[in-house]
Every structure is written in C-alpha cells, then in structure tokens.
Image (spheres, coloured by chain):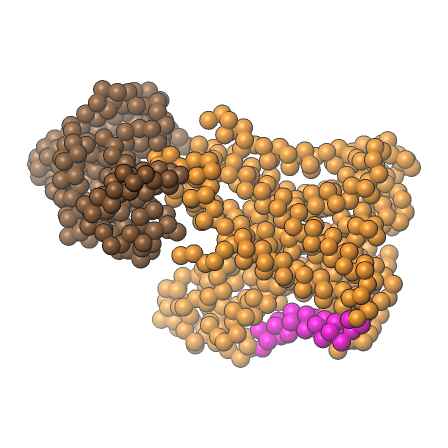
Amino acid sequence: MTLTLRSAYRVPVILAVLVLAPMAGLLSLGQLPGFEPQDLQFWQSAYIRRVIFFSLWQALLSALFSVIPAILVARAFALNGNFRFRSLLLRLFGLPLVVPSVVAVLGIVSVYGSNGWLPLGRSLYGINGILLAHVFFNLPLAVRLLLPIWQAIPRHYWQLGEQMGFSKWHRWRYLEWPALKEGLPGVLLLVFMLCLTSFAVVLTLGGGPKSTTLEVAIYQSLRFDFDPAQAVMLALLQLSLCVLVAVVMLRFQRLPEVEISTSSPASKSESYRSLLNWVVILFAGIYVGLPLASLLIDGLSGPLGGVVSNIYLWQSAGNTLMLGLGAATLSVIAGWFLLRGSSELANLGQFRRAQLVELCGSVIYVVPPLVIGTGIFVLLSPYVDVFEWVYPVVVLVNAMMGLPFVIRTLSPAMRQNQMRYQFLCQSLALSGWNRFRIVDWPLLRRPVGLSAALVAALAMGDLGVIALFGTPDTATLPLLIYQQMGAYLIPQATVTALVLLGLCLLVFWGLERSIGGKTDA
Amino acid sequence: MLEIEKLRYQFPGDKPETMQFDLSVAAGEVLSLIGPSGAGKSTLLNLIAGFLRPESGRIHVNGEAIEHKPASQRPVTIVFQQHNLLPHLDLYTNVALGVSPSLKLSPGQRQVIKDALDTLGLTGFENRKPGELSGGQRQRVALARALVRDRKVLLLDEAFASLGPALREELIALVKALVQRKQMAALLVSHQPGDALIASDRTAFVHDGRIIALQPTRQLLQKPDLAEVRCYLGTL
C-alpha cells in the first residue's frame, strides 16, 4: 500500500522539479552578468511600464471581444436547435484549437493584409491584428465552453416558461442569465489568461515596440538584447501576473466542460428560432472560416514549387514531426501515471491529495512556457551550450504544455473506469499488465488517442520555446514560417503554413485513429 | 460457515461513524440484509469481500481467518447491481475472467465455463456483448462468473434491484438452488423486503452500522417488534 502511495507522487515530484528548477534559475538573478540592483525597480522604466500596460490592455480587450460575441453565438446555437450544418459549424469552431497560431496569423494576413479581401493596410500590425487573431482563437473556444450552459438548462424550465407566457426578455432574465452567470467569469478569465500569455500572435502581428507584451519582451531581451537579467525580471513579472489571475480564477472555479458531443438538445421546440440568431451564426461562421479559406486559396495559388523544393522545408517538417510525436508520447505517459496516482489516492479517501496531484499537471497554465524556457536558459547556459540541447528542452516544455489537455481529456474517463471496475478488478485479481490489457486499455484508448493527437498538434504548431532556442538545423515549420514572414516572403510563408497545417491535421487524424482504434460499443 | 465477529470499521469522512458487525451464515443458507440506505449493508459486504479494511474483528470462512487476505484471494465472490461486466468483452470472455485473469484457459477450464453458461441458460449467447443483452441476462452472466469462481461465500449487493418482480423472483430461486447445491453461504442485500421473503429463512436488519435484529424473515417483516424496523417498513 505504501508503495502505491509513493508512486502516486512520482509524476508530481518530477513536474515540480521541472518547474521549480527553472524558477530557481530565475531567482539566481543576482549572479547574472549585467545585473544592476536598480534593474529591479522596473516601474522606473517607461519601456517596462508600457509593456505591462499593453499586456493587460490587449488581454482585456481580447477577452471582451471574444466572450461577449460568443454569448450571442452560443445562445443562437442553443436556441436554433438542430439545423443542417450545425455539427459541421461546431466542428469548424473546434479547429482553432489545433490550428497553429502562425498558420492562423497568415490566414488573418491573407484576409486583412494589404493584398487581402478586406485590406486594413499597415494598421493591421499592432493592436488591430492582435485582436483579430485573438478573437479568431478565443471566440470559438468561448462558444464551445458556453454552449453546454444552455444545454444544461432543464427542458422543463423552458416548458414552464412557455406555459407562463414568458417573453424573450423573461426567458433571458429567469432562465438563461442565472445559468450563464455561473460560468461566465471563469470563461472570461481563461481567455484573459490565454491572451496575456499569447506569444506567437503578438510576435508576428505586434509590429514593433509600441505593441509588445511581456511574453514577447522576454524573448527579445534573450534573443536580441542578450540581457538575461532583464529577461529574468520580465519573466518574474509575467509569472506574478499569471499567478494573480489564477488566484482570482480559483474563486470562480466553475469552468464549464467543453461540449464533447455535437448533438443538439432534442428538447427545444422550433419556436425559439429567430432570424437574428441565423445572422449571428452566419457572421461567426464567416469570421472563423474566412482566414482558413483564404489561406487555402492563397497557398494553393502561391509559389508551391519553389517552397516544396527547398531542403529546409523538409528538414523543418522532419523536426516538427519528431517534436510532435516526442511531446505527445511524453505527455500522455506522464498524464497517465499522474491520473493513476490521483485516482488511487481518491480510492483511499484522500480526495484533497488526489486533487492536489491532479492540479500539479495543470500548473503550466500558470507558468508560461517562455518563463520556463528562460529559466532553463539561465540554468543551463553556464554549463553547456544550450543550443545543443534544443530538441530535449523543446520536447519537454511542449509535453508539459500539453499535460493540462491530457488531464482534461483523460481524467473523466479514467475516474469513471476506476469507479465502475476497481472492485471487480480487485476481486478477479486483475492487476498490473492484465488489468492494463483487459480493462484499462480497451476502455481508455479513445481518450488516450485524442489527447495524444491534441498534444502532438499543439507541439507541432508551437512557436514559443523553439523561437528562443531554435537554430537553422533545429528549426520547426512554425519557426521557418516566422523567418519567412520576417523576410517579407509572405507568399512563401503562406505555402509553408499550408504544409504545416496539413501535417498537423494528418498527425492529429493518424494518432486519433491508430491509438483510439475503431469505435467500440 | 461464514462467521463475523466484532468486525469494526470506521467510516471515513466529516462525521466519522463506527460500525460493528456480528453475524454467522450457515452453509446452504441465503441470509438477507435489509435496512435504510446508509445503514451499512454495502459496507459490510465490502468488508467481507476485502474492498475495505476493518479496524479490528474477525471474518472466518470454514474456520479460516480471511480478514488479512487481499480481495482476490478470499473465498468470496460478489455480484453488484451494475457494471459487473466489461462492455467491450463478449459474454464468454467476461465469464472466463473469473477463471483466469490472464485469459489463458485449459480445456478443463473451458468445460467449467461451458457448464456454468449452460446452468444459467446462456448457451448460444457466448459471443454477445453485454450491450446486446437484457438486464436479466446480464445478471445471469454475472452469476455464471460467480459460479465458475467456485468460492464458498456469495455476496449479492442489490444484484437484482434493477429487474422487474417476476425476473427477480426467478433469479432468486436460481440463486437459492445454486447455494444449496454448492453448499455456499450467501448474503443478499436488497431494498425490497419482498425479496427477503422469497430468498431467506432468516433476515438481518441493519441500522446505524449495527445488526439490531436477526430473526425469521416472516416474523421480522410481518410482526416487527422493534420501532426501527416498523419505521423502515412504514408500519409504525
């Protein structure tokens, strides 16, 4: 018994070391070259004050512009019931989760850039572009988070409302708003946090020091100013902001689950349908679909031959693939053992500890990857050439970033399995390999496949730590795209983005199918 | 044959409650346990099965102490109300798991499984998945597995609760016959006092973690002398 207990803490301890060691690296600030005590008085630097203000400001606007329209869209989806392209549209809204941010950025550029369908010209680069991209990612996410709130309103409430002659306003006031109010702060804060730590979008669309966030400033001080002391200070600032948001978020913990099934509530009568809702759905669909469609058209009519014959493209594609598969493997294995440990603790009635173990896996939500990257950089650079360790470092950080997704996907299924079959397994002496082979694997391979696919796609599309450490040899496709954009080779970058998108979708589909297996009753 | 002496268990949680049980079941007997929910009926079964660890006390089967053995090595087999079967395995494999958790079967063992399926009227259904069976058939499969495990003690934790009255009666009769033939000791937890009437000569009433009455079933249900029992039955 003590043995299983100790093993329950194994993964959390490894994770803690992985997170805390870079932190310790950060705190060794005093010994860094170029450190002056007055560096700590960041509020005296106009540059840093501006960076902090802009980080918060763009995150606030992004959150509001994503979540408020998302309320209308989710409501429209809920009230208009089942219609022809409903599940297709909801699947489209699931895409931004796996579309790499650089790819989406190029999609945005191809719609709103100077040669696009709705040109904004130079004003795209800056707050406008950042907001357009953040809304592209987070509006669909918010819709998928908010939609279940409507679906959870019991059907009898609607029927009672009808019987009592509720108007639209009454329905909103008595049925919809009270349900929404519970989940809304959590969704707003989540989107705020995601935008606060957003890196690739700001890096590519920020367009200069005027619109730089902490995350990008960290990168610039490491990569261009060679000023580790400033990077560390910025990283600590960023970390404190994130912890602050996370603490507020814990107060509104009731984050609704992402809708898994795309089926509509069978209950809603058609009388709630309205023209306005159709318009809302149409606009949201166009907003999300347009950048992807435009990217596809631009990419296919772009300099295909030139890009495809470039040896760097294939080298980067290989690196990308290795990164995706490596991170997925590591993340799923870590997640599996973490959840195993947590459910064993839960079985012993130690629910608090079980929850704590599970929380460890989500800690990366609070610690931005670039902060960990900076820590590793500071920690390793006195001893080794950091640029020779790119692959393991990038795989490790991406696996950690994927862990919250693994836990979210795997945890409910694993808990249910444990609840249903633990006694049966005990009484039939099913343990170890036999239990894995006969009970756990067949029943859990679908969520395992899905989480592996998610982590792989996220890692392959990540432009974060790789931007910090990447060299021409170790570049992944997102880094190549960023370099092409930096050289104003937008058509080439667009084609590369298409290759990346294809690779991501292929790996996602392949992993989900091969690991997940065929649908089992 | 099954002897339980001063078996104590501390229920974990915010308000700890100590349960203590004394009970003995003879070979060939099906003893019923009734009582309000939360009284400790399922806890008692989980203690006997080895899913929970008692604080102190003895569990003897045929004179042998079993309270320190892991669940799989106890001479005990249990049938739950649901989730007895793994949904992705066919009926035959589900029963075979009772013989060998690694599913390596000798010809002799195959014959044992075949006989058990035959006894429970499941011949011909071997390749069906649990999802394709009715609730009654699923519980028959669970009983078939209990049979192939060939243990001395049979625990039924509301095993028939989700079935209709006729089916319940039929399966209880089947269990009674099997228990008698194999000379097992069986405990039946049920929410339907009617089940106890069919199944058991003796019935125990569990209240607040104790067995406060152990009487002939008819007397307990039809002429209850304890206020707690009358309150539970609604005849107060």
Q: Which of B33 and A456 is in front in this view?
A: A456
Q: Where is residue A115 in the image (x, y as percent from the top left)?
A: 81, 76
Q: Which of A261 and A233 is in front in this view?
A: A261
Is B220 above or below relative to B9?
A: below
Residue A482: quadrant of the picture: bottom right
Residue at position x 65%, y 50% from top? A325
Q: Chain B is drawn in which colour?
A: brown
Task: Name the dominant secondary structure of the magenta segment.
Answer: helix
Residue at position x 34%, y 46% from top? B93
From the image, which quarter does the C terminus of chain B lie in?
top left
Is B235 above or below relative to B26?
A: below
Q: Where is residue A489 in the image (x, y as percent from the top left)?
A: 85, 67
Asked if residue A283 lies left or right of residue B127, the reply is right
Report the label total: 0
Magenta-tinted stretch? A279-304
Question: Which chain did the image draw in orange?
Answer: A
Residue A296 in magenta stretch: yes
Q: Where is residue A151 in the image (x, y as percent from the top left)?
A: 46, 62
